[in-house]
Every structure is written in structure tokens, then in C-alpha cells.
Amino acid sequence: MATMSKTAEQARPTYFPRLVTERLDIALCRASAAVARAADTHAAREGLGVGQHLVLQMLDAVGPCSQQTLSEELRIDRSVMVSVCDDLERAGLVRRERNPRDRRSYAVTITDSGRRRLAEARTSIPGFLDDTFGTLTPEERDQLGALLGKLLGVAS
């Protein structure tokens, strides 16, 4: 019986490879989920969440921003952004200050501690990307980046 079961298992067709070529939407969703899991695992080891890292990176690059701007630019839901900023503020990595241009809103600003933490986190990113996208050549990675940018409407 065990032999028959093993043989039946070996004879079963593998459908997923065909599905991937026929349905790019499914392939992209599955690839996205796999990369997201890898990023979450990496973030847990580093002690800085993916969203937290992105917020610190954007604040370091462009300066103080409202939570709304951070949410829109980073494509992070507003309610999640509040939590991300709360956690970063509690850790002393950002501070919220009244926005001098709009007293009804707050500007989120990266602190010196936030810059140091971001610099530490950045050192592990190349290794993470190599592990996650190791099956692609550098040219294929560039091509993937260009294609994803085009799909997202941000390609130059």
C-alpha cells in the first residue's frame, strides 16, 4: 500500500509551474507573499519592523513629514502608520512636533538615535537582498525592479 501511495504521489502532475506562466497575477501575488515573509523574518532578527525601517529611511531622505504623507508615499495604511510612528516615538527614534506649515497636523522627525538605528539596519540589507533574490542575476534584478516600477506607475 505504501509503495502504491508513493508511486501515485510521484505520478501526480505538478500544476503550479503552468499556473505561474498562465496567470501573472497569481505568480506576482505568490512571489510578493514569499518576499514579505522573508522581510518579516529578517526584520524580526534585526529588531526593526519593515514599516519602521521604511519610515526612518524616508524621514532621513526627505526630512520631517506628516503621518499622512508617510502613509501615502510608503503605501502603508493610515491606521498602521499611526502604530508604526507610535512605536518609533516610544523607542526614541522619531519625534512628533507641530507642523509649522499646518498647526492642525504633526510633523514626524527622525532623531539622532533614529539615524544611528537606521545606519545599523542598513548594513544587513544587502545580505538580505542577496539571500532573497539570489536566484536572479544582477541584470535580472534590475529588470525586475524596472518592471515592478512600471506596474506601480513609478518607472522613469
Image (cartoon, rainbow, N blue to C red):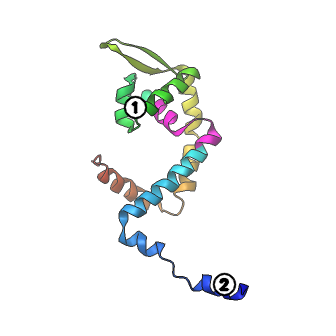
Q: Residue at x 39, y 37 (%)?
A: 74
In the rendered image, residue 92 lying in the magenta stretch gets the answer: no
Identify which amino acid the numbered label 2 is placed on.
Ser
Q: State whether residue 92 appears in this view.
A: no
Q: Residue at x 55, y 26 (%)?
A: 87
Q: Nearer the viewer, residue 44 or 116?
A: 44
Quick check: 6 above or below 113? below
User: Residue 28 sits in which quadrant?
Assistant: bottom left
- Whole-percent x, y for residue 118 in the image: 54, 31
Give the number of callouts: 2
- Whole-percent x, y for residue 27 in the image: 42, 63
Majority SS type along the magenta span: helix
Count neighbours of disc 1 (C-alpha within 10 A) and say few if under 14, some if 14 to 19, many if 20 or more.
Answer: some
Q: Residue at x 39, y 30 (%)?
A: 70
In the image: residue 124, left or right of residue 65: right
Which numbered tag is attached to residue 78?
1
Identify which amino acid the numbered label 1 is placed on.
Arg
Which mark is in front, 2 or 1? 2
Quick check: 116 above or below 100? below
Q: Which residues are magenta?
A: 43-58
Q: Secondary structure at mark 2?
A: helix
In the image: residue 7, left or right of residue 60: right
Q: Which residue is mark 2?
A: 5
Which numbered tag is attached to residue 54?
none
Nearer-N-terminus badge (2/1): 2
For the N terminus, which image quadrant?
A: bottom right
Q: Secondary structure at mark 1?
A: helix
Count neighbours of disc 2 (C-alpha within 10 A) and say few if under 14, some if 14 to 19, many if 20 or more.
Answer: few
